[in-house]
Image (cartoon, rainbow, N blue to C red):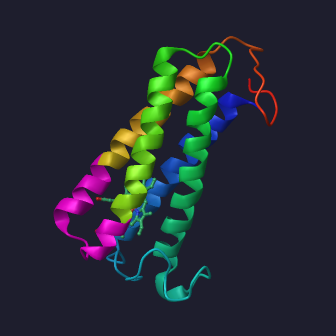
Amino acid sequence: MYFKYLALASLVILYCLMFIGGYLESSGQGLACPEWPLCPSGFLPSAAYLTEWTHRLIAAMTGVMIIATAVASWKVVGSHKNLRITGTLAAVFAASQIVLGAIVINTQLKATIVAIHNGIGILLFAMTLLTAIYAFKLPRGATIKASVGSVE
Ligand code: HEM
């Protein structure tokens, strides 16, 4: 398994998520799905809240990928303190964003909470970007055991 590609994929999916979040807000669809964690149609999408459903689905995928990147950042050969710090902080911010997403809905888009949701999103992006940069700077061919395979 290639650590640097996992880190890069996390960055790309996060960028897409933030893009969709911006669209969600500016198009006024933030409360199209008023329930948490699932929308009224459950796991299935609905035309009535497709943007919000997509934001949540991609948020879940992004969370899993960023946490996987954080775990791998501790295992990869050549891992260093900065890589572990940014990878772990990204995971912490990603988890906070999921919780904040619920609060955004439950407070009916309270301006302060939406601003915090946006602010932590920026910090999350910064940590994920740094993690990807560090990942690409790791020595070529560096691999390590992981229970599921080797990490480069
Ligand atoms: C890693 C996870 C997440 C990230 C990085 C993220 C990021 C963002 C960003 C950047 C915005 C635009 C905010 C703005 O322009 O001020 C946004 C909006 C929004 N997010 Fe998220 N989000 C995440 C997870 C979630 C989750 C799980 C929910 C659950 C419901 C959620 C609900 C919302 C809502 C409702 C808005 C629109 C707010 C409004 O209309 O004022 N987000 N998100």
- Quadrant for residue 29, please give it: bottom left
Q: Is residue 45 left or right of residue 148?
A: left
Task: Say if the magenta span includes residue 105.
Answer: yes
Q: Is residue 77 left or right of residue 31?
A: right
Q: Position of residue 33 (x, y in %)?
A: 42, 82
Residue 23 visible somewhere in the drawing: yes
On screen, residue 1 above or below 55: above
Q: How many marks?
A: 0
Task: Say if the magenta span includes residue 144.
Answer: no
On screen, residue 41 above or below 121: below
Residue at image location 31% in from the left, 76% down from the top = 28
- Residue farthest front in this picture: 147
Residue at image location 62% in from the left, 41% down from the top = 68
Q: Position of residue 131 (x, y in %)?
A: 52, 28
Q: Quick check: which quadrant has ligand 1?
A: bottom left
Residue at image location 48% in from the left, 36% down from the top = 128
Q: Is residue 150 left or right of residue 35?
A: right
The stretch in magenta equals: 102-119
On screen, residue 72 above or below 79: below
